[in-house]
Amino acid sequence: MKPRNRFEKAVAASNMKLSPVSLKTIEWALGNIIVHIAFRTSGHNCTCGDCGAKFDHRGRGKSVCCPHCGHRLQVKDTLKRKNVQSAYFSSLEVADDLQVQRVFLLRAVCRKGIKLETSCMEVCRLWLNAGGKMAVTSRARTLGWYMDSFNWCTGIDLKLLSEVHWVISDTYVYPRYKVLPELRRNGMKGRLPDACHPARLMKALLTDSRIETMMKSKELQAVAYFVSRPLDLDTCWQSYKVAARHHYHPSDYGLWCDTVRLLEQCGKDIHNAKYIFPKDLKAAHDYWLGKRNKAEEKRRTQEQIAKAKAKEADFYKEKSRYFGIVISDNDIEISVLDSIEAFQTEGSSLHHCVFQCEYYAKADSVILSAHDRQGNRIETVEFSLSQGKVVQSRGLCNSNTEYHDRIVGLVNANAYRFLEARTPA
């Protein structure tokens, strides 16, 4: 890809001046991002994956120190003789007043009886200027479903920044890094936030003063969360400032931001310490979630009632001829639901969807409610006019009750009454 502007030309020129990765960087990556293992067989014979020496280990611990090379190893009970690991890591450097994140792929091969074999290949470089503008130089990708399908025979040239580069550059960073004076001025020095994308962090520090404020305050957990969730930062920034002034540090920023949004949806003041500094964050989150859900359910019910009222005239026109039909025996009384309000009450009492699914608007059905002699609801019955029989009868939470067969039998035995009402003489 040819450079299209002055910034890309500067990136292409600086891309040729970078030196190979240092041995100290590779040694750090090998010691921190690769799992060093000891092959152990059922006979407690262990083989060090680093130096290849054999030793005996009968302990039950998950780790052991090799008596030959002194490396701490993770014990792995296996009969395999080979273990291959690959992992990405990064280093941060400065070249010609440009910040660059260099991404490397480290590959380690452990074989029984042989010293650890490693190889390190540079994959891509993410470039930033002092204004936060970004570009990428990378190896060419091959066809395939995997994001790390790179052609290792190609050089690192200017490419279009894609999601692949963002994903593979979200890596561990070598702690001895160099950054632009602007980044150091904005708080990027010392330990970096855990689980935070390095390039996104640098871009945010150069373009967003709010991230700069948190970085200078050493709120690394907040930085790591908000760098990857800028929409949450827009919503919760004012609340965060209040929390920072009162030295309140949530244990879980994701849960805290959700709580702030719930408070706002419930009409509460999200700048009030009474609400945004809960002692038990999870309990407060669950409480306001319940409040929001109840309010949302009430709103939906009101909308459904308004929608039902619009169809009320058609309901009375089509179903009023069946009103007054009552079927009973010694224990049960079954009557037609004769109003929109009756449908809503029936659905709320028995916790089913007779109202939400608008059974009052079904032209082919008559809906009845079965009660006992004390007035307690038992089941809701749907009678099909075209089939002349009951098509379903549902009790609490759509379950069948002990009266189910009696109710269905009673309504079917009186099917002629509905058919006579449908076609009056």
Image (spheres, rainbow, N blue to C red):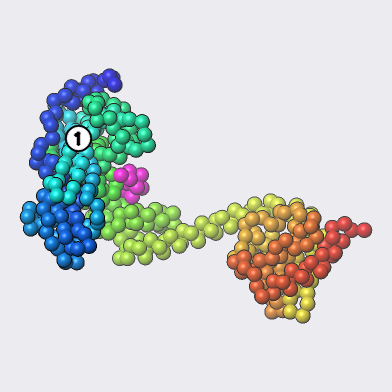
- Is 36 or 211 nearer to us in this picture? 36
Question: What residue is drawn where x is 14% and y is 53%?
Answer: 48
Give residue 376's position: percent from left, percent from top.
66, 75
Give residue 135's position: percent from left, percent from top.
26, 29
Give residue 27's position: percent from left, percent from top.
11, 44
Question: Where is 423 relative to 215, above or below?
Answer: below
- Is 424 or 316 nearer to us in this picture? 424
Corner quadrant of residue 16: top left
Corner quadrant of residue 44: bottom left
Give residue 220's position: percent from left, percent from top.
21, 50
Q: Is residue 113 left or right of residue 339?
A: left
Amino acid beneath label 1: Met
Question: What residue is drawn where x is 22% and y is 26%?
Answer: 155
Q: Is residue 122 magenta?
A: no
Q: Is residue 170 left or right of residue 297?
A: left
Question: How many dots with numbers?
Answer: 1
Pick the quarter of the image with the C terminus: bottom right
Question: Where is 1 relative to 371, above or below?
Answer: above
- Is 90 or 218 nearer to us in this picture? 90
Question: What residue is drawn where x is 18% and y is 22%?
Answer: 13
Disc 1 is placed on an element classified as strand
Pick the quarter of the image with the N terminus: top left
Q: State whether residue 370 appears in this view.
A: yes
Q: Main secondary structure of the magenta part?
A: helix
Residue bounds of the magenta highlight: 228-237
Which residue does the numbered mark 1 point to in the structure image? 121
Q: Residues within 10 Å of mark 1 (few under 14, many from 20)?
A: some
Q: Residue furthest right?
A: 425
Question: Where is 156 relative to 192, above or below?
Answer: above
Question: Where is 40 relative to 181, above or below?
Answer: below
